[in-house]
Amino acid sequence: MTEKLIDGKALAQKMQGQLAEKVERLKAEYGIVPGLAVILVGDNPASQVYVRNKERSAIKAGFKSETVRLSEAISEEELIEIIKSYNQDPSFHGILVQLPLPAHINDKKIILTIDPSKDVDGFHPMNTGHLWSGRPMMVPCTPAGIMEMLSAYEVNLEGKHAVIIGRSNIVGKPMAQLLLDKNATVTLTHSRTRHLADVCKRADVLIVAIGQGHFVTKDFVKEGAVVIDVGMNRDDNGKLIGDVKFDEVATVASLITPVPGGVGPMTITMLLEQTYQAALRSVIK
Ligand code: GUN
């Protein structure tokens, strides 16, 4: 079984170790410390966990990390002012506003406020445009991390059929573009897709980002397919589970990511990598 496992945790640790060395060199050569500002509004428990993990990993890799925890009641205008102050602060190379935001705040307007050169989430329309025109700058971190995993495990995507479940701006849509860039044939499915299991069963690579615990069973998976599980759900006992029924799907997949320890740690790694790259660009124009 273990030879089937895509160990995102181990790959992330390796990459973050290499990143810490690059950060040391950047400090030594240019006197610059990559700075990441993470803004969290409200007390969504899942967001609190994600933000804490991002902060811990950033500090461990030698970054300057600042987390701003704001009350749910903050106004859109106040939040915009805070983002603008980080846009202007040269000691911060990356700004991330954790989503979702409270309903009274327009998330599109907030994303538009972030300086595209500091938009380490790759959510600003300018970065989306770069990605879709085939010249990626800042790429959404979860799909970027998945591409790193596929590459590390030598999954050849050329001419392969990749099926994605979920069409979000954070995962599904950018994932489709990154797979197209590697010459995969991409099917992007969603909640209205008919005969979903049949469509998925034709996939050589299946990326699951539907947000429903244990949704994908082995009836969705072709023998020998590569299965990537983006899900982070809690079961009735509060246990963290993916969107894929791991135990049964692992019997047919050739490679599969676990939850936890698969995609999650790679998302953080890519966030740090893009913050490092932004810091590097600030000195090497
Ligand atoms: N919420 C869930 N995933 C993400 C992410 O990758 N970035 C941000 N900013 N918020 C999220």
Image (cartoon, rainbow, N blue to C red):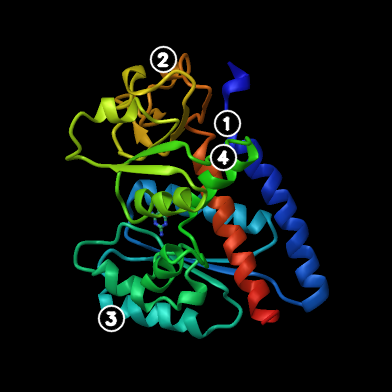
Q: How far apart are the two marked residues, 3 and 2, measured between alpha carbons?
A: 49 Å
Mark 4: which secondary structure? helix
Mark 1: which secondary structure? loop
Q: Earlier in the sequence, mark 3 or mark 2?
A: 3
Vertical arrangement, residue 184 with respect to residue 177, above or below: above
Mark 2: which secondary structure? helix
Foreground label between 4 and 3: 4
Q: Which residue is mark 2?
A: 248
Task: Using the rendered image of the protein, determine whether residue 142 is visible from the camera's viewpoint.
Answer: no
Q: Which residue is mark 3?
A: 77
State the image quarter where residue 219 is shown: top left
Residue occupying image coordinates x 53% and y 22% = 254
Q: How far apart are the two marked residues, 3 and 1, measured between alpha carbons?
A: 43 Å
Q: How far apart are the two marked residues, 2 and 4, measured between alpha carbons?
A: 21 Å
Residue occupying image coordinates x 44% and y 16% = 247
Question: For the residue with label 3, is its CB less than 8 Å from the closest atom of ligand 1?
Answer: no
Residue 116 coordinates in the image, percent (x, y): 46, 75
Foreground label between 3 and 2: 2
Foreground label between 1 and 4: 4
Farthest residue to the right: give it: 28
Q: Which residue is mark 1?
A: 6
Q: Which residue is mark 4?
A: 150
